[in-house]
Every structure is written in C-alpha cells, then in structure tokens.
Amino acid sequence: MTPTDWQTRIGDMWAAEWPRTDRSFTHLSPILNAAILAAAPAHAATALDIGCGAGGTSLGVVTARSDLTVTGIDLSPALVAIARDRVPQARFHVADAARDPIRGQPDLIFSRHGVMFFTDPVAAFAHVRMQVRPGASLVFSCFRDRRHNHWAGDLVAAVTGVAPAASSGYVPGPFGFADPQLVEDILTRAGWSAVRAQAVDFAYVAGAGDDPVADAIAYFTRIGPLASTLAAADPADRLRLLDRLATALARHSDGSCVQFPASAWLWRAQAGKCA
Ligand SMILES: C[S@@+](CC[C@H](N)C(=O)[O-])C[C@H]1O[C@@H](n2cnc3c(N)ncnc32)[C@H](O)[C@@H]1O
C-alpha cells in the first residue's frame, strides 16, 4: 500500500465507504477516544489527527472537548472533503504527515489506524516529533496480528482456502504495526519517550441493517483483505468465493449484525523534551 494508493483509488474507495469503515470501529472508538482525552492537556490546546480519514476520531475528540483546536491531516483529498463537511468544528488539510510542515506546534497527536502506512516510519515519527510541542502526547491505535483479527485471518482462510501469511518485519499496510516490539523500536528511534502499548480486544462490525450478511458482503467486496481477490477472480470463481463468503459471514451474524473478534494495540508516547 503506497501513499499514491491513498491519494487515489484506495482513498476514493474509503471515501465512498466511510459510513461502513467508521462503523467497523464502533466498539474500539470509545476506548481510543477516552485514551486520547485522558492524554489531552487540561487547558485549551492544539491537537493533530494524523491520517484522519473521514474525521470520525476528530469528531469524537472535538465534541468532548470543544476548547481543543483540532486539525486533521490526510493524504486523500476525497476523505478530507468528507471530514470538512462532517466536522465543521475542526480543520482538515490534505497533507503528508511524513514530510509536510505541521502547523501550530500541537500538544496532542492522535490517530485511529492512520500511522502504519509510512514508507520510512522512523523518519516519519521523527518528523512529527520535531514539530510538536516538547512533551506533547501521542496516542494511536493499530491492528494486532491477523490471528487476533478474525475478519482478516480466519475469514480469508475460509473463503480462499489459504491462511494469510503471518506478519514479518515492517510492511506498510493495515498490519504493518502488528508487532509491538517493532513499533516500540520505531517510536524510540524516532525520539519518542514513555512508549507503551495496551492490547484492546473489540468486536469488529462488518454488517448491519435488514440483511447484515448482504451488507457485509457489499463491504468486503470493496474494502479489506478479500476485496482484491474478489475483484481479480473470473466470474465463476467469484461466484464460488462469494458463496463461501456468505456462508462464513452467516456464522458471525446474530440476525441484526455481523461481528468478528478483533484486537488493536493502543499506543501512548511523549515527545522528548529535547530535539
Ligand atoms: C486505515 S485509514 C484510517 C482513517 C481514519 N483514521 C479512520 O479511522 O477512519 C488510514 C488513513 O491514513 C491516511 N494516511 C496514510 N498515510 C498517510 C500520510 N503519510 N499522511 C497523512 N495521512 C496518511 C490514509 O489516507 C487513510 O485515510
């Protein structure tokens, strides 16, 4: 997954699907938002949402703390346009967090799953650290390994017959920060201190509404680990894969919702006091 993917086709797809991507984090967001708010200075301050997407986390933060000046940045113009419409209380810019100047010396930096796509994560986190206020707090979430995220592990194996390979080393993408040792090393080398991780289990919502299985199929044909396989399959294979997907999703449906066991790392760190 490259920065260009987010600026174009993947960002555009996330923009088209933002209500479903936002909904998938329904049970993680309150935990992440509480951690962000706990790290926020008690006084009026500036906050930065990295990889803000459609602005869901900025919305949660600025709603709870209207005295915070929240700015979201993202590579995708389509997602930034949605965030601007959705969260007029915050500001949003198209920018690359890895290299573009960061305005206003933020006291608080946060992200919901927006920081594991950097080509050079040590350089990117060092770049951010050098432009925030010394002592600023960093709070972000990212996925744990696919073994803990059944919608990306077991489900893929059930549909394709092949278990996805375990993560090894850093590869930019949704599971790029699955290994906590690697992330601790990245943040420490980038000059962040008081680096610590907390595992958070949650239910990943894939489908809802009158026909939650059909809703989840519509979602997974556009976003997630099966989307490219389904798009590349010939018509007969695609029908077979969709049939298996429907069967697997039905096993996770209670009739009103399709949910999967999922798990994230919640990271906290502080910008060192000296450059
Ligand atoms: C998995 S999505 C999460 C979006 C949003 N935070 C949410 O929770 O819905 C990752 C986001 O990070 C953004 N992103 C990736 N690399 C980035 C970079 N270098 N600078 C700014 N945004 C970036 C993508 O465009 C995308 O919107």
Image (cartoon, rainbow, N blue to C red):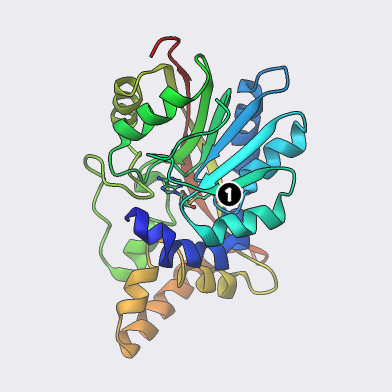
| In this rendering, position of residue 240 left or right of residue 51 | left
Assign the C terminus to one quadrant of the image.
Answer: top left
Compared across the picture, whether 39 is left or right of 178 comes to: right
Residue 150, x across and y down, in percent: 42, 53
Image coords of residue 211 (percent x, y): 64, 74
x and y percent of residue 42 in the render? 71, 17
Q: Is mark 1 within 8 Å of ligand 1?
A: yes
Q: Residue at the location (76% across, 28% down)? A: 67
Whether residue 206 can be seen here: no
Q: Nearer the viewer, residue 1 or 274?
A: 274
Q: Disc 1 marks which residue?
A: 25
* Name of the residue lying farthest toward the top: 274
Q: Give the residue drawn at x 30%, y 81%.
A: 233
Are there few (<14), some (14-19), or many (20+) residues within 10 Å of tag 1? some
Give the side of residue 82 with respect to residue 99, left or right.
right
Residue most toward the bottom? Answer: 236
- Please say if 127 is above or below 189: below
Tell me: residue 6, above or below residue 100. Answer: below
